[in-house]
Amino acid sequence: MSERDLRPGGREQWASKIGFMLAAMGSAVGLGNIWRFSYVAGENGGAAFLLLYIAIIILIGVPIMLAEFSIGRKSQSDAVGSFQKLAPGKPWVTAGFLGVASAFIILSFYGVVAGWTLKYFVSYLTGGLWSEPADGYEAFFGGFIGSSVEPVIWQFLFMALTVGVVLMGIKKGIEKANVILMPTLAILLIIMSVYSLTLGGAQEGLAFLFAPDWSVLAEPSIYLAALGQAFFSLSLGMGALITYGSYLSSKERLPGATAGIASLDTVFAIVAGVMIFPAVFAFGIDPSSGAGLVFIVLPGIFDQITGGMLVGIAFFFLLAAAGLSSAISLLEVAVAYFMRKFSWTRKKTALFIGGLIFLLGIPSSLSMGVMADVTFFGLVFMDGMEYLSDLFLPLGGLIIALFVGWGWKKAESLEASDFGSSGIGAFWLFLLRFVAPVAILLVFLAQIGLLDWILNFFGVQL
Ligand code: PFF
């Protein structure tokens, strides 16, 4: 690391505003937009889920994202240190510890799925997937993820890449990697969704994604699924954006950056839906068939395109790359914390923490095969980890919203966010103080069945 990477206080920082924007976008846009969004939307009824998801992004996600950036930039510290610095001795720091725990949990299974994308990329590169495998794409995927050793090797390779970038630091590693990859991924997604629309399942696919069947809203679990997915996709609630905000100087305008990042992330998810669902219907696949959706549906599309293997190579390369830019931010949350806490070097911390997270991911990988019978609360290990992230991220977000909404003085919050005295700043605080916390609490209550009980108690019939 050269002297120029450091500020007088010794902390690294982004080289440019666009570098920060791209890194934050790189964190937000990842497997969550393509792999996770498509299967979670598929399992939760499509269009009604999408609308709920968008409402959550606007009313809860965007305000909390701005709160995270404001905390990070103001404190110039990591997820835990931020709270300790801004509110010493107060319980708000719980959000920071939850965040570091979430980084371990999420990156452990994220590395597994990203490893699958690497495997597909290399299979396209070397010809292994240039034509449909004898027993079809579904069996190919099932056979691969169900085996014990191979997916763990891909997971290891992916984690090694992630550690490699984080090792190199903020400007040379994290910032550089994002500048080229994000624009390329956007272009490819658009081309593929246009192609998917010509496949014959377009009408049904688009109806599934855009014509709501409101009855699915009666299912209480859809709310936590949408909330968890919104936080996951925006990289919210665990201090990733606090950490990235802490490498900012005070010159940036945070509200504009926040709006840009959240919109781009949402557009990516919708375009991914437009790419996947027409093909799902064209190939007669059940949209709620789960986490394998993109690994089964997309190869089917590539099979039909002339030169589809080239598209396959490019697509899985970019998906792995999008996963990498997100994984980097997950690892950085934990690395930034442990580096400061124990005064370790960046290199040592990245290697050690990356190694631990790799080990924690192995049971997730095995839960697709040999450990498929081991369940907790009825979920296999990997699904259990995902479920935990659905709980931890909104919980972290709740504390962050309360901290900036109530823990800070009004003028302090408005200054930290660059809103100054504008009316829209007051609206932002209103969302943070009331709307986001109440909505998150209601979703939690609904999830544990308590909301139903309370409504019944008061004789309200929904
Ligand atoms: N937002 C990433 C995605 O959509 O793939 C995943 C993620 C990254 C979640 C960073 C949380 C986080 F802090």
Image (cartoon, rainbow, N blue to C red):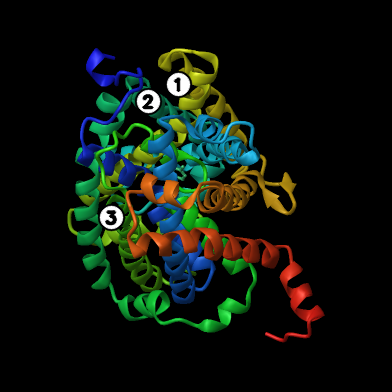
Query: Seen in the image, is 46 located left or right of residue 200?
Result: right
Q: Position of residue 230 (x, y in %)?
A: 47, 58
Q: How many numbered tags mark residues here?
A: 3
Give the structural element (helix, strand or loop) at label 1: helix
User: Along the line of sight, which residue is nearer the eye, 425 or 213?
Assistant: 425
Q: Which residue carries the number 2 mark? A: 166
- Residue located at (27% from left, 47% from top): 253
Mark 2 or mark 3, which is nearer the start of the sequence? 2
Q: Which residue carries the number 3 mark? A: 260
Question: Gap in Å between the C-alphas at discs 1 and 3?
Answer: 30 Å
User: Along the line of sight, which residue is nearer the eye, 282 or 195?
Assistant: 195
Query: Seen in the image, is 384 located left or right of residue 428?
Result: right
Which mark is in front, 3 or 2?
A: 3
Q: Quadrant of residue 154?
A: top left
- Residue located at (52% from left, 49% from top): 142
Q: Which mark is residue 350?
A: 1
Quarter of the image with the N terminus is top left
Is residue 124 visible in the rendered image? The answer is no
179 over 201 or under it: above or below: above
Marks 3 and 2 close (CB-CB < 8 Å): no
Mark 3 or mark 1, which is nearer the start of the sequence? 3
